[in-house]
Amino acid sequence: MTGTLYGIGVGPGDPELMTVKAYRRLKEAEVIAYPKKGRQSKSYAEQIIDAYFAPEEKRRLGLHFPMTKDVDVLEPKWNEAADAIWAELSAGRDVAFVTEGDPLLYSTFIHLMHVMERRYPDAPIEVVPGVSSANAAAARLRLPLADGDEQVAIVPARDDYEAMKAAILAHDCVIFFKVAKVIDLMIRLLRELDLLHRAAVVTKATSREEVIWDVERLEGAELEYLTLLVVRK
Ligand SMILES: C[S@@+](CC[C@H](N)C(=O)[O-])C[C@H]1O[C@@H](n2cnc3c(N)ncnc32)[C@H](O)[C@@H]1O
């Protein structure tokens, strides 16, 4: 029997926010796969599951996805990752690929799933949803994301003042992911729209390292990648 590839959402940081199903799939899978960063540092998703599974408890398969947009560099690495997963599945072993938050929301798993579908169309794939960082931040801030007829958007923040402004103007509430590198632009924009008092910035929501920032003092700050900004008008 061919094994199954599970895309597992492990939630936003607090291990208790992993679903019972995610836990069971991780417990039952023979192999846990994760996106590997540098030689030393652990991925955030791996840190979350460490609360329940000791690293030596079962085989861990670190998959390296270079941080580049160069297709000639990326393509062979994605294929390598898919081949490594297929080697396990074809030997009858289930592979649980862990992802922070939800696996189908701006996640490495999305591309991995597409590569698997292309290269190994017979590979069984199942997705276990996770609590996304957007929901986690809302809970920590006690901030409704949308109510009644309101419209909410999730937008990857970019160095594009007009596009970011248009997103804010078009929705009642916007969650900006990947905001760390453009925080100064976002703060300037929110100040100019007189919405800074309506914004919140959260790093590593619900984890032990969570920070809820004072937005008035953020200009020039060096923020971690796992930071989002939410503005509710
Ligand atoms: C590649 S996306 C992953 C989103 C993830 N799949 C989810 O469902 O939350 C990475 C971006 O999500 C946001 N993010 C993910 N986890 C976070 C957390 N625990 N706290 C704050 N922001 C987070 C950050 O904006 C980060 O730049």
Image (cartoon, grey):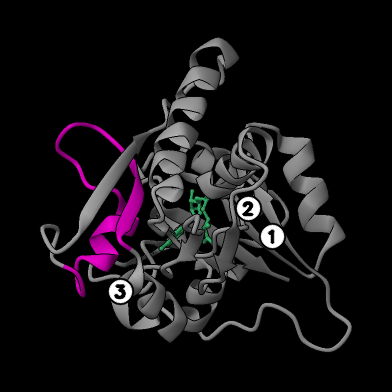
Q: Disc 1 residue type? A: Asp
Numbered circle sitting on residue 27: 3
Q: Disc 2 residue type? A: Arg
Q: Position of residue 34 (x, y in %)?
A: 35, 49
- Can I make out residue 108 in this image? yes
Q: Earlier in the sequence, mark 2 or mark 3?
A: 3
Numbered disc 1: secondary structure: loop
Residue, x 46% and y 81% (percent of image)?
A: 21
Q: Position of residue 230 (x, y in %)?
A: 59, 64
Q: Position of residue 106 (x, y in %)?
A: 60, 50
Residue, x 36% and y 62% (percent of image)?
A: 204
Mark 1: few/some/many CA within 10 Å (<14, 14-19, 20+)? few
Residues tagged 1 and 2 counted as in contact (Cβ below 8 A): yes
Mark 3: few/some/many CA within 10 Å (<14, 14-19, 20+)? some
* Residue range corresponding to the magenta coloring: 30-53
| Front: mark 2 or 3 | 3
Numbered disc 2: secondary structure: helix
Q: Marks 1 and 2, Cα distance to the nearest angstrom?
A: 5 Å
Numbered circle sitting on residue 99: none
Q: Marks 1 and 3, Cα distance to the nearest angstrom?
A: 49 Å
Q: Which residue is mark 2?
A: 191
Q: Does the numbered disc 1 mark a residue whose Cβ is under 8 Å from ligand 1?
A: no
Can you say which quadrant of the picture contains the C terminus? Answer: bottom right
Q: Earlier in the sequence, mark 1 or mark 3?
A: 3
